[in-house]
Amino acid sequence: MNQTNIQIDPEFEQFIPPLLPEELRQLEENILKDGAILSPLILWNGILVDGHNRYRIAQKHPEISYTTIEREFPDRYAVLAWICRNQLGRRNLNKNQRSYLIGRQYMAEHMQCGGLRNHNRSKSGKFTTEVQ
């Protein structure tokens, strides 16, 4: 059953390396051939955590059905760490993408545990580290 009130968090979405145009085209072809999105979209408090490309395809083709699973996480840093772990286990990533995700996972996991020692929140609300 399709859900219409799914929210997109730009920070969550940016943690997911983009598909190559050919990969996105193939994903859309597979979904259209199946007539449904077979893997559920993962949500946290109504916010899309996993399935951004599939969700975009579903919006483009409203006849395509999909399901959602609402997951529980203690906070958004736990979500970010989960996204990184999930992506690292799912894709053929290049060296730079893998390094980026590993670094982001490390930061997210440490923010869960009370944060890094020398951190500031920038005007955008994102954390930055200071070198002293």
Image: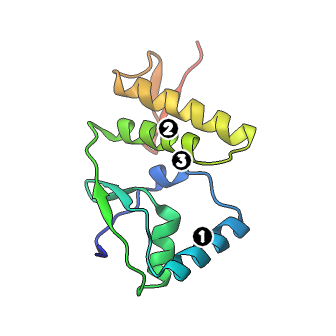
Q: CA distance from mark 2 to mark 3?
A: 11 Å
Badge 2 amino acid: Arg
Mark sitting earlier along the chain (2/1): 1
Residue 27 marker: 1
Residue labelled with disc 2: 85
The quadrant of the image that shows the C terminus is top right
Residue labelled with disc 3: 15
Mark sitting earlier along the chain (2/3): 3
**Camera-side residue of 37 and 132:** 37
> In the image, is residue 78 above or below residue 31?
above
Q: Residues within 10 Å of mark 2 (few under 14, many from 20)?
A: some
Q: Are marks 1 and 3 in contact (CB under 8 Å)?
A: no
Position of residue 8 measured from the top left corner of the image (x, y, whole percent): 40, 61
Position of residue 89 measured from the top left corner of the image (x, y, whole percent): 55, 41
**Camera-side residue of 4 and 85:** 85
Badge 1 amino acid: Leu
